Image: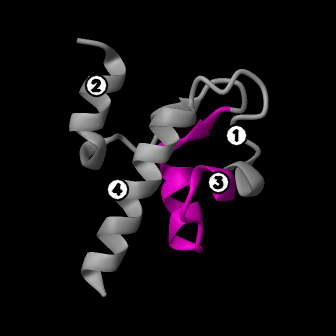
Amino acid sequence: MSWMVKMARGVRRVNRNFVVCECTGVTAGRIEQAVMEGARSFDDVKETLGVGKQCIKCRDLISLLVESYAEDIEESV
């Protein structure tokens, strides 16, 4: 099982210090903050934090995180 599949299953338990984009050093916590500030897609996070502009290996994981964090926010409203 790939680390991506494992991560998708446990996306709500991701350590906020986990580096999601190795090219920029952006962590799960920074992505969560971007979602709290209104980001709702990979492209929103890309624009806000500069992720995914080089190798784009992080694209799927960031998309999963954004979706999960956005769901959490919507459920709490």
* Mark 4 → mark 1, Cα distance in angstroms: 18 Å
Circles 4 and 1: CB atoms closer than 8 Å: no
Residue under label 1, please give it: 51
Q: Residue at x 29, y 35 (%)?
A: 8
Task: Tell me the tag on residue 68.
Answer: 4
Circles 4 and 2: CB atoms closer than 8 Å: no
Look at label 2 and name its amino acid.
Val
Secondary structure mostly taken by the magenta-highlighted segment of the chain: helix
Q: Which residues are magenta?
A: 25-45
Q: Quadrant of the N terminus?
A: top left
N-terminal of the two: label 1 or label 2? 2
Give neighbour class at mark 1: few <14, some 14-19, many 20+ (Cα, 10 Å).
many
> Circle 1 sits in a helix, a strand or a loop, which is it?
loop
* Mark 4 → mark 2, Cα distance in angstroms: 14 Å
Determine whether 35 is above or below 22 in the image. Answer: below
> Circle 3 sits in a helix, a strand or a loop, which is it?
helix
Circles 1 and 3: CB atoms closer than 8 Å: yes
x, y percentage for residue 75? 25, 77
Look at label 4 and name its amino acid.
Ser
* Mark 1 → mark 3, Cα distance in angstroms: 7 Å
Residue under label 3, please give it: 45
Left or right: 62 in relation to 43: left
